[in-house]
Image (cartoon, grey):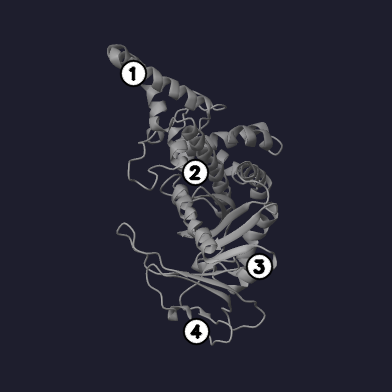
Amino acid sequence: MLASFYQTFLEKYLNKAQLITLKMLVWLLQTQKQVRIERLAATLPLPIQQNSRRRHIQRFLTLNALSVVLLWFPIIEAIINQHFKVESQLIIAMDRTQWRENNVLMVSVIYQKRACPIYWCLLEKDGSSNLEEQQKVLRPVIRLLKKYKLAIIGDREFHSIELGSWLHKQNIGFVLRQKKDTTFREKWQKFQPLSNIEIYPGVRQFYTNVKVTQRRGFGRFNLAVYWKRKYRGKQEKSAWYLLTNLPDLNTALNIYAQRFGIEAMFKDCKTGGYNLESSQASPDRLVRLIFLIALAMTSAWLHGQRTKFQKLDSYICRQEEKNRTEKRHSNFWIGLYGESALREGFPPQATANPKGFNWIEALHGCQAWVEEMVGSIRNKQAYYQRGLRAMKLIQQSL
């Protein structure tokens, strides 16, 4: 269980009061689904004035001990070690998200079509990242995961041949999407833009030993070209042009297709989960808030995975429908909305904003009415008892 692991580990770096504050803030993120400091201060269960609670959170978020490398790396490494065998392949996605003046460059590991954050930094500018900034976030991740075979994927922002060449020199696989105006040259041929390739939906092509820059000093790589055919009335707007050092078309396509897991993760951080875009924190505090989100998100995902394994997810969300290819709810969603306020290690008297209530919290708030209803409908008592048992198991797994 993530909570017990990071509590045991964090005791080495945080004193008792700091550890309790961390636990309460992660709990509030789960119940409030909100990272605004004002909201967290309004619901922080400490018997002090509201302004004092706000300053308490602000001071906590400036602690030097809240370091991604120091605190998060051992936790995410342990999780990865639990789910992947040493020397197996890890797909590492790099992407960037921006809202208002906040510009976050993030590296994540893809697992079961979902991305889990590993390392991130704030860019002190608007717009795209450059090679130096990309190397800055990739180097710590490469060192951390040196026991695995890595494949780095990135969208058109990360199209540079310099990045691909740098990764190739470290024996790291990569699949980087290119812009269609990028020029390339096959051996003994002239340079031409990618847009000159005859491509239409359903076509797949693989070019080996191509050169994608007219500058000297860079090697030749492979180029995968693919335009997904129309499916269930949906049509991709454009083709994929993928620069890679991987050996064949299918491998490159299958790996790059998993990049969209990071889009789901950004949604979890924002409107689909913790509303990160509403944060007005300073850059230093924002980096640490993302650390808290990483803890909360991973905890929710692991809890959702455990809930589905116990076949208790039907008590939290609608079950999958026949002929539906996509899951209705992810492990993250099940974990986030299935967690009880009465989590182990948190004060049971701490109450959450009604917006953060889930069915278990609501049941405790209406316990007398529920007991009265259960007692009045005798033919349904077996179902109620089964549900109470499921609720108990869900709480025990937190």
> Looking at the rendered structure, which numbered label has been put on residue 370?
1
Q: Nearer the viewer, residue 336 or 54?
A: 336
Q: Residues within 10 Å of mark 2 (few under 14, many from 20)?
A: many
Q: Kindly identify which residue carries mark 4.
A: 192
Precedes in sequence: disc 1 or disc 4: 4
Q: CA distance from mark 1 to mark 3?
A: 62 Å
Q: Kindly identify which residue carries mark 3.
A: 168
Precedes in sequence: disc 3 or disc 2: 2
Q: Residue at the spot x=67%, y=44% of the render?
A: 74
Asked whether residue 328 appears in the rendered view, the answer is yes
Would you say the residues marked 4 and 2 are in contact, meaning their CB atoms lie under 8 Å apart?
no
Q: CA distance from mark 4 to mark 2?
A: 52 Å
Q: Kindly identify which residue carries mark 2.
A: 37
| Amino acid type shown at disc 3 | His
Precedes in sequence: disc 4 or disc 2: 2
Relative to 14, is 366 on the left or the right?
A: left
Observer-side mark, 4 or 2, equals 4
How far across and down, in percent of the image, does residue 289 sit? 55, 46
Q: Residues within 10 Å of mark 3 (few under 14, many from 20)?
A: some
Local SS, label 3: helix
Observer-side mark, 2 or 1, equals 1
Observer-side mark, 1 or 4, equals 4
Q: Quadrant of residue 31?
A: top left
Local SS, label 4: strand
How far across and down, in percent of the image, does residue 67 sit? 65, 48
Q: Quadrant of residue 232?
A: bottom left
Q: Residues within 10 Å of mark 4 (few under 14, many from 20)?
A: some
Observer-side mark, 1 or 3, equals 3
Q: Quadrant of residue 100?
A: bottom left
Would you say the residues marked 1 and 3 are in contact, meaning their CB atoms lie under 8 Å apart?
no
How far across and down, in percent of the image, does residue 303 sit? 51, 35
